[in-house]
Image (cartoon, grey):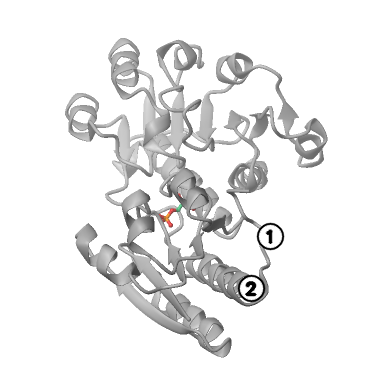
Amino acid sequence: MKILVATDKPFAAVAVEGIKKEVEAAGIELVLLEKYGEKSNLLNAVKDVDGIIVRSDIIDAEVIEAAQNLKIVVRAGAGYDNIDLEAATAKGVCVMNTHGQNSNAVAELVFGMTVMMVRNMFNGTSGSELMGKKLGIHAFGQVGRNVARIAKGFGMEVMAFDPYCPDEVMVEAGVTPVKDVNTLYSECQFISLHIPATNETKKSINYDLLKQMPKGAVLINTARKEVINEEELVKLMEDRADFRYVSDIAPAIADEFKTKFENRCFFTPKKMGAQTAEANINAGIAAAKQSVGYLKDGIDRFRVNK
Ligand code: 3PG
């Protein structure tokens, strides 16, 4: 049996070592394909493998079709919008993510980018503080919960909107649940996005929602660029000189943002949220264990295409 680790953005070397150990201890061969660039390299590499471990790498119907022996794909991370679930299900391929394994890393970046923005990119001018300010967490999953924990340390007042999360979970975390997304945006100067990219959420963060944010608004996106209606966000930032946007996923029209709002936007050059040794180790080794568990014993906890 073979498991392929296909990561165009590689894991830390120490994580790769850990993955190799897990897989080989189970008597399974590990194949490593990093920084592969062209899709044809991926198509070639998947031909005879039983399992694939990926990050944001695109596993579409063509890749699934090319992998004739494929039984499992594990997304070492949270969002699995890069995997064609329908094509996988049609071929009887199990798809999993690694629930919560990289969430602290992403949550810490939320504050790294936010502090940098409210301190005016450290340009020597007076900025502002987070203490006492209201933070709205849009979707209270694993990353949202870590963001709440850290925000409390900053002395922020934290609210969250998530129709899929029971109020008790938020209350226990010291977070005020809000029942209506408009309340979250109209109350909070800071909004941190943690919604997945789905047909329902794509472009859902739009002008009408964002315009409700109080003066000095900062929108923080460590989720997906697809959830933003980029043209409408540009319009809003043209209309409101106080509005700022930081994102771990550069918009499709990043150049337009940078030209128009030089000091009011920041985008990491590459998605960096989960790019820590700790997150790579946690997510990578969990992915290895889940792949082995499925291939050897049929354990399908964390399956997302039931
Ligand atoms: C995730 O969905 O887990 C994060 O966006 C991290 O993605 P990455 O593994 O591509 O950095």
Residue 80 shows in this picture: no
Query: Height in image: 4 above or below 94?
Result: below
Point 68% across, 27% down: residue: 163
Residue 64 percent across, percent down from the top left: 39, 57
Q: Residues within 10 Å of mark 1 (few under 14, many from 20)?
A: few
Q: Determine whether the residue tagged by mark 2 lies in a helix, strand or loop.
A: helix
Q: Residue 237 appears in which quarter of the rendering?
A: top left
Q: Is mark 1 within 8 Å of ligand 1?
A: no
Point 46% across, 36% down: residue: 197
Residue 4 shows in this picture: yes
User: Going by the image, does 11 lie left or right of 94?
Assistant: left
Asked whether the beta carbons under mark 1 and mark 2 sit within 8 Å of each other, the answer is: yes
- Name the one closer to the observer, 92 or 184: 92
Residue 52 percent across, percent down from the top left: 44, 67
Query: Height in image: 63 above or below 168?
Result: below
Point 52% across, 82% down: residue: 23
C-alpha span from label 1 to label 2: 9 Å
Which residue carries the number 2 mark? Answer: 293
| Disc ID at residue 173 | none
Q: Residue 239 appears in which quarter of the rendering?
A: top left
Residue 44 percent across, percent down from the top left: 25, 69
Q: Determine whether the residue tagged by mark 1 lies in a helix, strand or loop.
A: loop
- Name the one closer to the observer, 56 or 114: 56
User: Going by the image, does 294 lie left or right of 123?
Assistant: right
Given the image, on which type of amino acid does mark 1 rest? Arg
User: Going by the image, does 103 lie left or right of 120?
Assistant: right
Point 22% across, 66% down: residue: 41
Which residue carries the number 1 mark? Answer: 301
Work out whether mark 1 precedes mark 2 in sequence or the reverse, and give the earlier one: 2
Given the image, on which type of amino acid does mark 2 rest? Gly
- Name the one closer to the observer, 195 or 182: 195
